[in-house]
Image: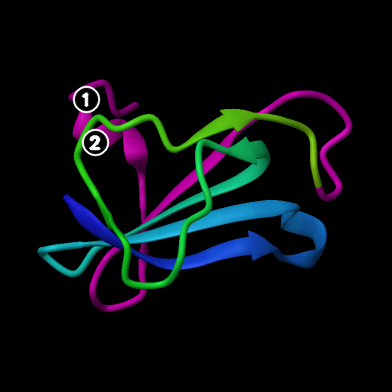
Amino acid sequence: KGKVEFADFRGNEGLVLELRTEDGMLVRYAHLARLRREYRVGDEVAQGELVGLVGHTGLARNHRLRMELVDAKGELLDPSLLTGNAR
């Protein structure tokens, strides 16, 4: 589970939702069409909960989802590491 740190439009990224997990990792979703509900900073989100719909906000020219994982030190991680399918 995690807590909302940001839920709004942010320039080139379009509609963005950022969640901070209990272990300090930041999960960022960008270019969303819309959020499932109105999120406020501090709202709790359960693992597996549907949080938004794929869209093409910001500079995205077609429907896409950008997901980023940022560790507690601020370094980007490869999301495929979570599935065991890293290349």
Q: Which residues are magenta?
A: 58-87
In-image side of 18 versus 83 (left or right): right
Outermost front residue = 38
Instruction: For mark 2, give the secondary structure.
Output: helix
Residue 81: which disc? 2
* Residue at 26%, 21% in the rendered image: 85
Q: Which residue is mark 1?
A: 83
CA–CA distance between discs 2 and 1? 5 Å
> Eyeballing the image, is 10 above or below 38?
below
Q: Residues within 10 Å of mark 1 (few under 14, many from 20)?
A: few
Quadrant in which the C terminus appears = top left
In-image side of 49 versus 68 (left or right): left
Contact between marks 2 and 1 (CB within 8 A): the answer is yes
Residue 82 pos. (x, y %)? 21, 34
**Amino acid bearing label 1:** Thr
**Amino acid bearing label 2:** Leu
* Residue at 72%, 55% in the rendered image: 13
- Magenta stretch contains residue 78: yes
